[in-house]
Image (cartoon, rainbow, N blue to C red):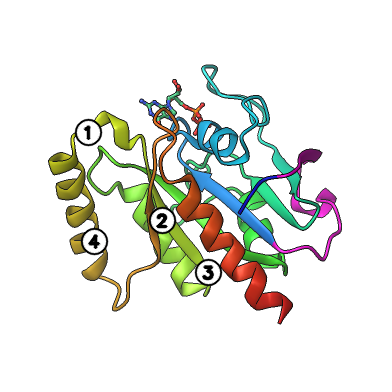
């Protein structure tokens, strides 16, 4: 897919104020600092589209971008657990869960995980929650440039093994580096494929 245009549409403070749209939507989410903004900028080719952080605790917003006038790219806030509920169940913020559960044109949620880390509890809790709610998702291993190919393969194999403990089938997986600009085509082609299947 060639990116011809990428325009910022709106920052929303809640699901209810997200822009109305029938365009297919693809959202990106992960823990803060996982490399989400850098990935979005790399994918769109516009280095300033999403703000690369440095300052934790920035406002939680849902950012909508329109790509090629035909689909939406959505930058969701970095997740962490919301304050522990009375039952001590770990929950995600209402803004994120409402968006994911209700956005009818959301075709894939890309969950970003740092390729260097062993599976983190918060990511697996989130992924399992997606699974139990039948939300279509894919995994993106970020910052792949920080590992040599052997270490990267080892890390991804470890993740797959971990997922197989819970899942019968693995989700689509992508590996990328915003620094080396790798993984971009695979992700864009995946989106293009879904867009094409919707239009049939
Ligand atoms: P976000 O909080 O998930 O949006 O993460 P950012 O995109 O702001 O990145 C967090 C930090 O990781 C920044 O210092 C980035 O420069 C760095 N970073 C992001 N992507 C990569 C990558 O692919 N490779 C390397 N080496 N560093 C990255």
- Whole-number angstrom distance, CA of label 1 to CA of label 2: 18 Å
Question: For mark 3, what is the residue?
Answer: 136
Q: Is residue 141 left or right of residue 3?
A: left
The quarter holding residue 107 reads: bottom right
Query: 97 or 4, which is in the foreground?
Result: 4
For label 1, the SS is loop
Query: 55 or 45, which is in the foreground?
Result: 45
Residue, x 46% and y 73% (percent of image)? 132
Check contact, mark 1 vs mark 3: CB within 8 A: no
Check contact, mark 4 vs mark 1: CB within 8 A: no
Question: For mark 4, what is the residue?
Answer: 160
Residue, x 41% and y 56% (percent of image)? 139
Q: Looking at the image, is 69 positioned above or below residue 138?
A: above
The quarter holding residue 52 reads: top right
Residue 99 in magenta stretch? no
Question: For mark 1, what is the residue?
Answer: 147
Q: Quadrant of the N terminus?
A: bottom right
Residue, x 18% and y 56% (percent of image)? 157
Query: Does the rendering let one see residue 126?
Result: no
Is ligand 1 less than 8 Å from the beta carbon at label 1? no
Which region is colored magenta? Answer: 4-24
Residue 139: which numbered mark, if any? 2
């Amino acid at each position: 897919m060639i990116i011809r245009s990428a325009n910022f549409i709106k920052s929303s403070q809640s699901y209810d104020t997200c822009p109305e749209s029938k365009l297919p939507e693809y959202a990106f989410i992960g823990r803060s600092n996982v490399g989400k903004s850098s990935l979005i900028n790399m994918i769109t080719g516009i280095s300033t589209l999403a703000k690369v952080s440095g300052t934790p605790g920035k406002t939680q917003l849902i950012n909508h971008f329109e790509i090629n006038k035909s689909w939406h790219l959505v930058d969701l806030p970095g997740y962490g657990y919301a304050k522990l509920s009375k039952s001590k169940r770990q929950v995600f913020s209402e803004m994120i869960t409402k968006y994911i559960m209700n956005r009818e044109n959301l075709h894939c949620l890309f969950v970003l995980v740092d390729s260097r880390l062993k599976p983190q509890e918060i990511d697996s809790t989130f992924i399992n929650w997606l699974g139990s709610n039948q939300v279509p998702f894919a995994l993106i291993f970020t910052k792949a440039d920080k590992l040599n190919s052997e270490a990267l393969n080892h890390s991804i194999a470890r993740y797959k093994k971990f997922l197989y403990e819970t899942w019968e089938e693995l989700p689509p997986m992508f590996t990328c580096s915003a620094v080396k600009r790798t993984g971009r085509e695979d992700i864009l082609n995946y989106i293009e494929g879904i867009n094409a299947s919707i239009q049939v």
